[in-house]
Image (cartoon, rainbow, N blue to C red):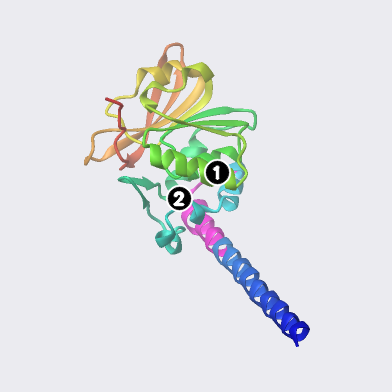
Amino acid sequence: MNRILCSLLVGLLSLIMGGVLFCSAQERDHFARLREAMVASQIVDRGITDPAVLKAIRKVPRHLFVPERYRSAAYRDHPLPIGSGQTISQPYIVAFMTEALSLKSGDRVLEIGTGSGYQAAVLAEIVQEVYSIEIVEILGKRAKGTLSRLGYANIHIRIGDGYRGWPEKAPFDAIIVTCAPTQIPRPLIEQLAEGARMVIPVGRKGAVQRLVVGVKTGTALQMEQAMPVRFVPMVRER
């Protein structure tokens, strides 16, 4: 009787586990379809053409970088809150800023504002090394955990003031800033390699900011304004 009961329990457990795995696979397929639809309608249709950028965004599971209660909305055409007053950017903005950097596979990139870690993951699919700074400790630690679980060994996260950059790892082949200072921080310009690009939103909190694409020439940044945007403000250490 015990042997029969044992067999029944093993069979039941197998069914349960199989169901869990099946549901998990269903969920992965569901989000993969949403991701593909997002790329087609929100990104390709708006003019993003860089194959490396499109491949990265098709691969990175955006829904794993947002709080669980927002996962059903992860692939919609707008930013989402991630806690501590911060947001994950609209998918198109992530794609536009990444493409604007004109990245190469061997590049080393500095990101200011890790947030959930999603932008860092997209970058890491394209370049050799990503150095990312987040001033909000809880977000930086959470992003580090998410990225580690997903196997991103080429992303390095520091908790600290992004205004100062990461001087000991400079110069960088590109710098991307995902929070808005009122002026472009001089240390970031200094840490950019000659001829390299920076993409950064500039402007005051509550106002329409401008997204700037700059190229380092000598000690200056030759800038072009790309589009009006709204980003959370850059926070400084006191």
Which amino acid type is shown beneath numbered disc 1?
Answer: Leu
Query: For residue 48: magenta?
Result: yes
Q: Which residue is mark 1?
A: 147
CB within 8 Å, label 1 to label 2: no
Element at label 2: helix
Q: Is residue 70 above or below residue 50?
A: below
Q: Which residues are magenta?
A: 33-50
Where, quadrant-wise, is the N terminus in this rendering?
A: bottom right
Question: For this rendering, which residue is in front, 44 or 13?
Answer: 13
Which amino acid type is shown beneath numbered disc 2?
Answer: Pro
Which disc number belongs to residue 91?
2
> Please, what is the dominant secondary structure of the magenta stretch?
helix
Q: Name the residue at the bottom extreme.
A: 1
Q: Is residue 220 left or right of residue 125?
A: left
Q: Is there any visible trace of residue 215 in the rendered image? A: yes
Q: Is residue 225 left or right of residue 124?
A: left
Which circle's residue, 1 or 2, is located before the other in the chain?
2
Q: Is residue 51 left or right of residue 175?
A: right
Element at label 1: helix
Point 45% across, 49% down: residue = 92
Q: Is residue 64 above or below residue 175?
A: below
